[in-house]
Image: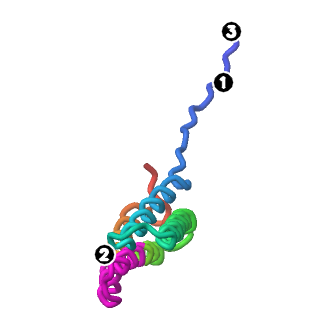
């Protein structure tokens, strides 16, 4: 009787770093930015452009950090995420009519908290060589 070779089972890898997540976050961010900029008045074309541009910037920023962030060391990758989140929150807060000082302060606070949280996450989920731990 002829025996055939066993075919090894291949695990299907799911790519979670596509464009779907960044686009969803970007659209929600852009809608929120346009809504905050309205100040209760009617929607204008400028506000829609503001929402579209801010959505594109956030989506591209998230996508680039997901794909190119792995080439950075965790000591640089964590502040990159902190800068993106701090700028995003500070910008939204400035659209509400807050002063530059308070918007900058909130952005710096979000930057600091997110940088520490990202560094902790990267530090605990990487092996000694800096590669993500297998799950």
Say which residue label 1 marks. Answer: 5
Say which residue label 3 marks. Answer: 1
Q: Could you say which is closer to the camera, residue 101 or residue 116?
A: 101
Dot 3, crowdedness within 10 Å: few (<14), some or many (≥20)?
Answer: few
Give the mark nearer the N terminus: 2 vs 1: 1
Dot 2, crowdedness within 10 Å: few (<14), some or many (≥20)?
Answer: few
**Element marked by disc 1:** loop
For the view shown, which residue lies furthest in the bottom direction? 101
Which numbered mark, 3 or 2, is in the foreground of this view?
A: 2
Say which residue label 2 marks. Answer: 113
Q: Could you say which is closer to the camera, residue 22 or residue 38?
A: 38
Q: Could you say which is closer to the camera, residue 122 or residue 52?
A: 52
Q: Are marks 2 and 1 in contact (CB under 8 Å)?
A: no
Residue 65 in view here: no
Q: Is residue 113 left or right of residue 33?
A: left
Give the mark nearer the N terminus: 3 vs 2: 3
The residue lying at 68 percent from left, 9 percent from top is 1
């Amino acid at each position: 009787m002829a025996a055939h070779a066993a075919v090894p089972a291949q695990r299907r890898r799911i790519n979670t770093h596509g464009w779907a997540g960044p686009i969803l976050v970007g659209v929600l961010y852009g809608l929120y930015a346009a809504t905050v900029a309205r100040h209760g008045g009617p929607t204008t074309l400028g506000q829609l452009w503001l929402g579209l541009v801010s959505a594109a910037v956030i989506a591209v920023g998230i996508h680039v950090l997901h794909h190119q962030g792995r080439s950075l060391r965790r000591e640089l990758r964590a502040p990159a995420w902190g800068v993106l989140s701090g700028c995003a929150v500070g910008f939204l807060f400035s659209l509400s009519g807050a002063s530059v000082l308070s918007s900058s302060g909130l952005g710096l606070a979000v930057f600091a908290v997110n940088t520490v949280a990202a560094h902790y996450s990267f530090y605990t989920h990487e092996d000694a060589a800096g590669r993500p731990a297998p799950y």
